[in-house]
Amino acid sequence: MTATASDRRIAHLDMDAFYASVELLRYPQLKGLPVVIGGGRRPQDEALAAAYAGRPGDIPVAAFPLLKEYAGRGVITTATYAARQFGVGSAMGMMKAAKLCPQAIVLPVDFEEVRKYSRMFKNAITEIAPVMQDRGVDEVYIDFTDVPGGQREGGRVLARLIQKSIFEKTGLTCSIGVAPNRLLAKMASEFNKPNGISIVYEEDLQSKIWPLNVRKINGIGPKAGEKLARLGIETIGQLAAQDEQWLMGHFGKSTGAWMHRVAWGRDDSPVVTESEPVSMSRETTFDRDLHAVRDRAELGAIFTDLCMRVAEDLQRKGYVARTIGIKLRYDDFRGVTRDQTIAEPTQDAATIRRVAGLCLKRVPLDRRLRLLGVRVASLVPVAPHSADSMPPARKQGATVGLF
Ligand code: DCP
Ligand code: MG
């Protein structure tokens, strides 16, 4: 059966207390306790890790650093649900959080570990449902429409299967919203957190979506939210009740039209699968063959420009690279490549330029060159990197601050 627009089923999946849950896998003794994740590794974290090297699960609960002992300007990245009961949460200063929940355990963020589990849970999903769009380290959209089980009970059957598979492969829980489109799915995934599934149908708009605050719309940020509040519009239902022309008058033509559309639950943006790139490169063939010594200045400028463009590509698409290389073609059309792997993956133009420069030193430069290229590989994702069904004026990133 080919799906028609009316039976599109789109899921939004968001991991529960992601960074904190990843730490609980390492320290199962902390399960159920208030734990906050924030700041970098401190000397006391190093000392504890060293004392129990290789057996983190043996660290006694009493040995972990507590929020009440914390001094500094750190901010909480995320908190376990046990800690959230005390009013502690993302983006709160640690000193302020210490007043609300002094007994909470403080752990540093381990990005390597978080990225590893991010890859694992995404792989678990694509094994079942191949059309998945990355929205950052802990959330994705999935097109359920043509996947077996994707229509049963509005998508609940498939959502349950995905939750189960992710849990079996990673030990982590997630929450899933399934709806006719991405806009509604994103809101729905929050309805039953943690470890929940929420199914939304078109006819649920009035009962489930319209009572929500306008800020729940992905794309209405603090500024637009405040402006709407000043105009007396707090809920999505109130937004839907406004005349489209009136909204256009206040927010501009395209944003006003977009607001009206999303308030009515309309969004036909597709779930776009982006395969992970293996490498990125920029190269240029010269107008005339250049000599490394005699045309040094010109060649140097082109080389730097290529490095900057590769760095921009990495930054725009949200990757850092571990391998940096060059490619040359001589005037006799022979080609040569060199690359070098670095310890700290990078997306920085100057670093790429420096390492690519070292590669260039390793090739013979006595012939003229007709082509020069810079290539990066061994890419590691660091940021959301896809367009979204955002308001037209300002595409904004997902809400994963540290990435
Ligand atoms: N994050 C961050 N900075 C923020 C908010 C979040 O670095 N201001 C990180 C830490 C989170 C992860 O991104 O673990 C995912 O963000 P979510 O908003 O999805 O929050 P959680 O997954 O932690 O919790 P929830 O169960 O509410 O999804
Ligand atoms: Mg999450």
Image (cartoon, helix red, strand yellow):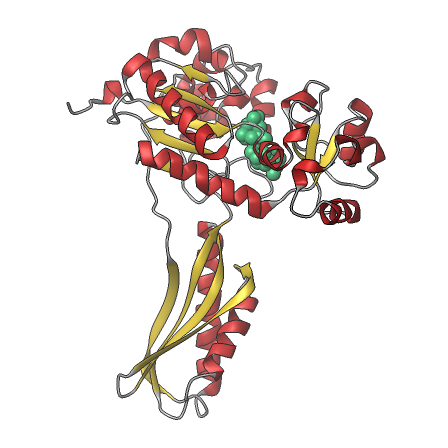
Task: Examine the rendering and report whether any part of residue 223 can be seen.
Answer: no
Residue in the picture at 55% in, 73% down:
354
Along the line of sight, which residue is nearer the eye, 396 or 172? 172
- State whether residue 306 is above or below residue 334: above
Along the line of sight, which residue is nearer the eye, 334 or 378? 378
Q: How many marks?
A: 0
Q: Residue furthest left?
A: 1
Residue 323 image position (x, y, % from top left): 47, 65
- State whether residue 286 is above or below residue 11: below
Q: Is residue 77 left or right of residue 309?
A: right
Q: Residue furthest top?
A: 207
Residue 316 image position (x, y, % from top left): 46, 52
Residue in the picture at 47% in, 53% down:
380
Q: Is residue 18 left or right of residue 164?
A: right
Residue 231 image position (x, y, % from top left): 57, 18
Q: Quadrant of ligand 1?
A: top right
Q: Is residue 327 left or right of residue 49?
A: left
Task: Examine the rendering and report whether any part of residue 227 can be seen.
Answer: yes
Q: Quadrant of residue 325?
A: bottom left
**Quarter of the figure with the N terminus:** top left
**Quarter of the figure with the C terminus:** top right
Residue 365 image position (x, y, % from top left): 41, 89
Residue in the picture at 54% in, 20% down:
194
Q: Quadrant of residue 2?
A: top left
- State whether residue 127 is above or below residue 363: above
Q: Is residue 325 left or right of residue 224?
A: left
